[in-house]
Image: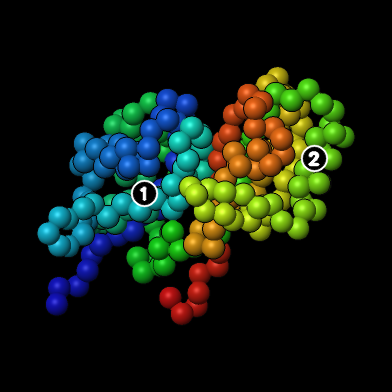
């Protein structure tokens, strides 16, 4: 059997205002188009309908921006991260920003299986005091259950909230931090946390700051 020469690159990128309303599927298409135009030697899956081996760690909900999206791509041959970034940058549409590129071990577990939580920065135009908004966060964190419904199914939001905090007050209002569970055990959504806080009707911006990954098993 011919030895593999494939390479796995891990890309951290930002999603800006220009593309925050596109779907996850359309985002994948944007990346695929940019990579092809840059003549990146993509590896493809096998089977009847081969697809480029591009894997985004966690879908970003529509309407959110981000500074910490992570994606792995598999290449047919090796290319330095520097040359990859230099060649790709001119082909990225407004709203996509390449933040970093690194080579990772090809046989690491999938990104999707390693994601454990995500941090968000949320701005709400609420007129209360810091003491009042901190009280709202404490009350939510002290709740034993937060029963809610999503797509016709009932679930408990509370285990999906790992931490909440107030970062301060800016020109747009109060800035809150959220660390929410993500992955196969369930995914917390910042808009649902805002609703539970009674802040759903306030004008706001939501940005995913980073994804957090669990340790890689020694068996892999």
Q: Is residue 11 left or right of residue 79?
A: right
Q: Is residue 80 left or right of residue 166?
A: left
Secondary structure at numbered mark 2: helix
Question: Residue 136 — which label?
Answer: 2
Q: Nearer the viewer, residue 38 or 122?
A: 122
| Scheme by which the image is coloured | rainbow
What count of labels does the image hold?
2
- Residue 207 in picture, x, y percent from top left: 56, 36
Question: What is the quadrant of the C terminus in the image?
Answer: bottom left
Question: Residue 81 — which label?
Answer: 1
Q: Nearer the viewer, residue 202 or 181?
A: 202
- Residue 138 in picture, x, y percent from top left: 81, 46
- Residue 123 in picture, x, y percent from top left: 66, 30
Q: Is residue 164 left or right of residue 13?
A: right
Callout 2 touching callout 1 (CB < 8 Å)? no
Residue found 68% across the figure and 21% down from its top: 172
From this viewpoint, is residue 212 visible? no
User: Which of the 4 image quarters holds residue 83?
Assistant: top left
- Residue 68 in picture, x, y percent from top left: 51, 43
Residue found 27% across the figure and 55% down from its top: 53
């Amino acid at each position: 059997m011919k030895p593999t020469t494939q390479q796995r690159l891990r890309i951290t990128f930002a999603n800006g205002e220009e593309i925050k309303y596109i779907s996850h599927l359309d985002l994948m298409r944007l990346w695929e188009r940019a990579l092809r135009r840059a003549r990146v030697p993509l590896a493809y899956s096998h089977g009847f309908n081969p697809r480029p081996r591009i894997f985004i760690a966690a879908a970003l909900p529509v309407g959110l921006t981000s500074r910490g999206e992570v994606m792995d791509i598999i290449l047919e041959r090796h290319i330095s991260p520097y040359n990859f970034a230099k060649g790709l940058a001119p082909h990225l549409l407004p709203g996509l920003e390449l933040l970093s590129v690194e080579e990772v071990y090809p046989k690491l577990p999938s990104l999707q299986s390693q994601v454990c939580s995500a941090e968000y920065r949320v701005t709400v135009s609420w007129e209360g005091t810091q003491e009042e908004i901190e009280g709202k966060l404490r009350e939510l964190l002290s709740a034993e259950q937060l029963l809610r419904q999503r797509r016709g199914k009932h679930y408990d939001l509370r285990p999906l909230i790992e931490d909440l905090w107030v970062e301060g007050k800016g020109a747009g209002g109060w800035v809150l931090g959220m660390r929410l569970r993500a992955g196969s055990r369930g995914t917390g959504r910042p808009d649902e946390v805002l609703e539970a806080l009674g802040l759903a009707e306030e004008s706001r911006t939501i940005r995913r700051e980073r994804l957090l990954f669990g340790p890689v098993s020694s068996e892999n």
